[in-house]
Image (spheres, rainbow, N blue to C red):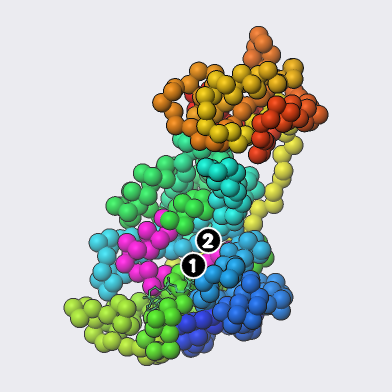
Amino acid sequence: MSDKKTPVVIAKGDGIGPEITDATLRILEAAGAAIEPTFIEIGEKVYRSGNTSGIPAEAWDALIETGVFLKAPITTPQGGGYKSLNVTIRKSMGLYANVRPAFTLKPWIPSPFPDMDMVIIRENEEDLYAGIEHRQTTDVFQCLKLISIPGTEKIVRYAFDYARNQGRKKVTCMVKDNIMKITDGLFADVFRRIGAEYPEIEQELMIIDIGSARLARYPDRFDVVVTLNLYGDIISDIAAEISGSVGLCGSANIGKELAMFEAIHGSAPDIAGQGIANPSGMLNGAMLMLEHIGQTDVAAKIRKAWLKTLEDGIHTADIYRAETSKQKVGTQAFADAVIERLSGIEIHAHEFRTSKPIETPEYHRPKPNKELVGVDVFLDWLPGNPEDLGKKLEAATPAPIKLKMITNRGVKVYPGGFSQTFCTDHWRCRFVHQDSNSQAYTALNFDQILALQQAIHAVGLEVIKTEHLYQFDGERGFSLGQGE
Ligand code: NAD
């Protein structure tokens, strides 16, 4: 145990937040956690004072200076343009890894999976959560899925380092690269490439649909799972639910300079102030924090005392079952029971996890030869015969550019196509310059793309968006249309 106290920022949050934080801090103190707390006010009160982010400027300063944040759940007021505080903190502070252990506590908490003990490592900053959405036509709305090489390398390496540090045996990567070959394909490629540096760890790649199904049916076959933001959001809730312990799980949000720890449940306003909330989720968040700051022995001691409390049948109302529980207790009495069981607990070296810090890797940006070879021009055009649109565009297209195809919601409708294909008012028209013999793409310049748009505009068609088509070191950086 270290004598030097580690400064940590703590927010007691809203609803049951203050009760479960107080209970958690009492246990930490009794266990000898060497922390020096600074308390900050975030959440409902701050929102209501007119700050739409829910976090005041001075709180940011404390977080940046300290780098460790234990956060109780907060209430996000409905409506009024209030931003999710969690998303704001994660993205502003670069908390790229969301680490969510999900384990069974059978027989104390009923679950059909006695041996489940997995950790889901979810990418936390990218994917559809960039929040870039547009309504483009009367019919069609879009949300951009952004996946980056540095973002993917960080999370995949984190998952492998985590597995290595914790002595875990297998890392499973879940993607949908059979459909999203470029974005999810990148995630899978990075997993294979970085995975080669960790030969002692078993590795598997799964398509997210069958992966989620297997996870729900055979959770005990999984160890560490790494995946993209949206899939991770969904499967971590599935995992928590089937572990039978949603209210008991904690999570860590890890960045290069700051890490935030919390319970996965919300502020439970329905039971706030009654002294009956279960502090275990917050306590598990705090144990992850102690491991992060190197106090793994204290974390292990608390984990043992907490498990012993559950084993002794001392349960809060949410997990109390007449058949398995012995005593129904409130928040503070549960904390007292954990504290009582701390004395006499011995921890052996093999029982606590290593505290070796996981370094965020430096990104070495490759320098590919990037070549502009075409453009997808998106049009708002009332559903009609694609032949008419195709002929009109071909007549307007300035040489040497050629119209390659038109798709509607990704399916090719010109040239060729099926009359059965349902069309909206959203048309993607692909223009390229290809060598007529080899079909190799030939470079274009930006002026040619602008001239093309001018020509399309001049014949009365409405351009809603363009997307340039690039080759990187001669490799196509864009997907083909379905049927192209
Ligand atoms: P919730 O998790 O707060 O509550 C769902 C149910 O679980 C309620 O019946 C509640 O009483 C119970 N519950 C939750 N935690 C418990 C505990 N520790 N002990 C005993 N019972 C517990 O979810 P919700 O009702 O959908 O959301 C309430 C508020 O929390 C909302 O304002 C929401 O935005 C916010 N929220 C915050 C976070 C966070 O800060 N990380 C996460 C989720 C929801």
Q: 102 and 441: which one is in front? A: 441
Q: Residue furthest right?
A: 447
- What whole-number distance in Å separates the C-alpha atoms at marks 1 and 2? 7 Å
Dividing the picture into quarters, in which one does residue 472 lie?
top right
Quadrant holding the N terminus: bottom right
Counting other residues with Cα less than 10 Å from the Cα at mark 1, is it few (<14), some (14-19), or many (20 or more)?
Answer: many
Q: 116 and 31: which one is in front? A: 116
Q: Are marks 1 and 2 in contact (CB under 8 Å)?
A: yes
Relative vertical location of residue 279 with respect to residue 430 in this rendering, above or below: below
Q: Is residue 79 left or right of residue 55?
A: left
Q: Residue furthest left?
A: 323
Relative vertical location of residue 116 with respect to residue 132 in this rendering, above or below: below
Residue type beneath disc 1: Ser
Task: Identify the residue at horizontal 35%, vertical 63% (top origin).
Answer: 241
The part of the chain drawn in magenta is 235-254
Q: Which residue is mark 1?
A: 251
Counting other residues with Cα less than 10 Å from the Cα at mark 2, is it few (<14), some (14-19), or many (20 or more)?
Answer: many
Q: Which residue is mark 2?
A: 98
